[in-house]
């Protein structure tokens, strides 16, 4: 139950003055459906309005003037702006309305009236102009024009001034709340109370006050991070509180390991040992297996699944795409079959008798392992004794989707896998509810990929070299740029590149993109894997995860548009065979200093974790880390990069609070419950920010 003291903040945004049927959808789109969401929407810049004269006015700045209305200049015809000429004794200004002007202005501000005006001054046709003044009031109300004014984001017909008014009304409803943070820590860090912090958040005096490193921003960020870490810690504790099947290391898995055509790396041995330790403990496992593309995650999962099968229980491995599911199936089915363990592949394409046979095999226990896509958690899929769920790239699935698969077995163990390199300092924001195993070694035999950057002006040279390599039997991926947020635009760019390459290389150029039907996509990928196609052109919406050892060339157009993590993963698709491999990063010159540094990192190292940390150091505007695609929570008040030093502190404090007071019944515990209700973070990891 939400504490009554928070009711005003969880009233619908329509309870704010002036938010009717027209504005409500705009407010919800910009901030959210309740008053709390408007309260958490902060200003983006600060305007300082200095009082000056026309003779001393500065272009491009917001300034305030005391003037006399000199003349109204109505539009001579429709579509032209309405103007008012004003005079302050030192010169004239023209006030301009491109819409919203008209006779009402003449009535409200008659010729000869004394007025205070404020807004941005520009020079137009030799004179001073102020378009749509922010303030136009009686001269005796000059004090009503603030010297400092926070500017809020706007959206269409929802103007920044309206958003500011709504945010300040939301602030009026913010109650004084009992302190949920440790007073000694707040004093040491010199952080204000929550109410003081949220008040300062909405009343900045300069752009410096908008910095994420100010005390009030750090306080608000820490509250959000702490609430999230509490939810993740509760989720982790809830899982561990469930007794789960005890699964011991088995001779069957050892035999499967001995039959492998390679030796496990030290990192694989260590990670497998950690997984086995969890499985044998009797509590529900929640572990992440993190490692670069090609680091051997699937093999570790396969050996754990062999242990589960030896115990007479079942496992399921779920991948986000059919292509990846088939790749996993191809990797594990034969080694497990050699040990007498049956594996089935279940995807959305399965129909009729074939699908029915697979469902019977799973329901009867005849098949000990299922590999598949979303098809695995459909209602008619039943397991005889599901004890382990393995989820590849878990951030690509929703919480409910992961839960629907796990719920098919009582207290099923969870092993998540991710090839997305995430800096250690940010891991807790995504994986705070999981124990982490790292595969930080490459399997022997993996050759480094020679990486170089080249401007797009050398495109013809790159294409000519590719043609020579193809004649020698090489295969290549050609990744097309992210043109825009429109999949159609990306598709057009890819189709254009495929057409251009076919003119040079002939029909051995294939194209895959997100709008292809799964059967068509799989057919093209199969042709590429079989060597029928020499070059595979792909858009970024396609998971090019098929293992093609003969592919030794990766060309990425406009590489500066990609996140470093994504570039690193794409590069990992080559270098899997015996041939020397290369990656060409084509860029549009000139490169910014940060873009140049980022491409240089890729040329210097192939360690995904090093790349992720370096990318974090260089992070500028936008989302170069690909955080949104990596499962990061969409925080409102915390910046996972600027506030990364607070993440581990919040996680430690959350664990400490729950260890001392697991049911949050103490005075601080009750205050912490209010914090959780304020942010609405739930143990499934979802919350106020989505």
Image (tube, rainbow, N blue to C red):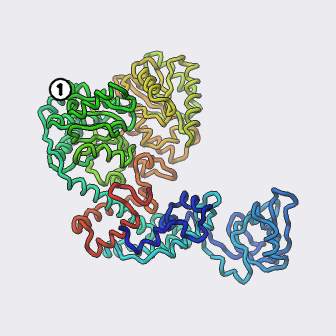
| Residue that extends furthest to the left in the rendered view of this protein | 251
Quadrant housing residue 501: top right
Q: Where is residue 10? Give x, y as percent.
A: 46, 68
**Callout 1 environment at 10 Å: few (<14), some (14 to 19), or many (20+)?**
some
Q: Where is residue 190? Give x, y as percent.
A: 39, 74
Q: Is disc 1 placed on a helix, strand or loop?
A: loop
**Up-down relation of residue 158 to residue 610 (above or below):** below
Q: Judge left or right: residue 497 versus residue 582.
A: right
**Up-down relation of residue 625 to residue 605 (above or below):** below
Which residue is label 1 attached to?
340
| Residue that extends furthest to the right in the rendered view of this protein | 76
Q: Judge left or right: residue 590 versus residue 625.
A: right
Q: Is residue 87 visible?
A: no
Q: Where is residue 453? Give x, y as percent.
A: 49, 35
Quadrant housing residue 522: top left
Q: Is residue 571 visible?
A: yes
Say which quadrant the C terminus sits in.
bottom left
Query: Which one is in front, 11 or 148?
Result: 11
Please name the residue shown 49% across and 41% down the image: 562
Quadrant housing residue 529: top left
Please name the residue shown 33% across and 40% down the image: 379
Q: Where is residue 448? Give x, y as percent.
A: 36, 32
Q: How many marks?
A: 1
Say which quadrant the N terminus sits in.
bottom left
Query: Which one is in front, 635 or 388?
Result: 388
Q: Judge left or right: residue 535 versus residue 613.
A: right
């Amino acid at each position: 139950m939400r504490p009554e003291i928070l009711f005003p903040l969880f009233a619908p945004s329509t309870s704010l003055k002036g938010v009717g049927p027209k504005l409500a959808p705009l407010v919800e789109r910009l901030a959210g459906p309740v008053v709390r969401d408007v309260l958490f929407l902060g200003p983006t810049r600060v305007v300082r309005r200095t009082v000056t004269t026309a003779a001393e006015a500065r272009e491009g700045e917001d300034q305030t003037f005391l003037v006399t209305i000199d003349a109204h200049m109505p539009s001579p015809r429709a579509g032209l702006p309405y103007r008012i000429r004003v005079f302050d004794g030192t010169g004239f200004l023209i006030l301009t309305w491109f819409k919203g002007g008209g006779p009402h202005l003449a009535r409200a501000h008659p010729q000869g009236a004394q007025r205070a005006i404020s807004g941005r001054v520009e020079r137009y046709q030799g004179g001073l102009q102020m378009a749509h003044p922010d303030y136009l009031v009686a001269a005796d109300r000059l004090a009503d024009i603030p010297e400092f004014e926070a500017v809020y984001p706007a959206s269409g017909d929802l103007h920044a001034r309206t958003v500011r008014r709504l945010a300040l009304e939301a602030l009026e409803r913010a109650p004084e709340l009992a302190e949920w943070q440790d007073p000694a820590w707040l004093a040491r860090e010199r952080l204000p109370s929550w109410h003081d912090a949220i008040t300062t958040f909405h009343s900045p005096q300069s752009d410096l006050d908008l910095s994420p490193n100010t005390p009030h921003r750090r306080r608000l960020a820490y509250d959000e991070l702490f609430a999230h870490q509490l939810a993740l810690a509760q989720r982790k504790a809830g899982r561990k509180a469930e007794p789960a099947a005890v699964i011991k290391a088995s001779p069957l898995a050892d035999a499967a390991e001995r039959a492998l055509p390679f030796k496990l790396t030290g990192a694989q041995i260590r990670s497998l040992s950690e997984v086995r330790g969890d499985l044998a403990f009797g509590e529900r496992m929640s572990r992440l297996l993190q490692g670069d593309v090609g680091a051997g995650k699937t093999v570790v999962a396969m050996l754990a699944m062999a242990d589960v099968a030896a115990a007479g229980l079942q496992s399921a491995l779920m991948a986000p795409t059919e292509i990846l599911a088939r790749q996993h199936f191809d990797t594990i089915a034969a080694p497990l079959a050699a040990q007498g363990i049956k594996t089935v592949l279940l995807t959305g394409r399965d129909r009729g008798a074939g699908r029915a046979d697979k469902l019977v095999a799973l329901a009867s226990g005849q098949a000990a392992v299922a590999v598949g896509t979303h098809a695995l958690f459909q209602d008619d899929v039943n397991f005889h004794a599901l004890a382990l769920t393995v989820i590849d790239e878990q951030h690509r699935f929703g919480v409910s989707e992961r839960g629907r698969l796990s719920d098919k077995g009582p207290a099923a163990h969870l092993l998540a896998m991710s090839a997305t390199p995430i800096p250690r300092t940010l891991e807790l924001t995504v994986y705070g509810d999981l124990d982490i195993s790292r595969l930080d070694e490459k399997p022997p035999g993996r050759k480094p990929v020679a990486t170089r950057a080249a401007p797009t002006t050398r495109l013809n040279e790159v294409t000519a070299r590719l043609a020579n390599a193809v004649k020698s039997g090489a295969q290549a991926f050609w990744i097309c740029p992210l043109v825009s947020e429109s999949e159609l635009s990306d598709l057009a760019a890819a189709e254009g590149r495929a057409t251009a390459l076919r003119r040079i290389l002939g029909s051995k150029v294939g194209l895959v993109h997100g709008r292809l039907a799964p059967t068509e996509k799989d057919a093209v990928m199969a042709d590429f894997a079989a060597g029928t196609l020499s070059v595979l052109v792909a858009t970024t919406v396609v998971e090019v995860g098929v293992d093609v050892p003969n592919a030794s060339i990766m060309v990425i157009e406009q590489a500066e548009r990609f996140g470093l993590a994504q570039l690193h993963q794409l590069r990992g698709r080559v270098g899997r065979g015996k041939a020397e491999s290369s990656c060409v990063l084509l860029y549009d010159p000139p490169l910014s200093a940060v873009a140049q540094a980022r491409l240089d990192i890729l040329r210097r190292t192939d360690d995904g974790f090093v790349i992720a940390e370096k990318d974090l150091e260089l992070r500028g505007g936008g989302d170069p880390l690909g955080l949104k695609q990596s499962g990061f929570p969409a925080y409102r008040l915390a910046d996972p990069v600027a506030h990364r030093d607070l993440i581990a502190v919040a996680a430690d404090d959350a664990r400490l609070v729950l260890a001392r007071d697991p049911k949050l019944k103490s005075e601080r515990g009750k205050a912490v419950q209010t914090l959780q209700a304020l942010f609405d973070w739930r143990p499934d990891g979802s919350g106020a920010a989505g």
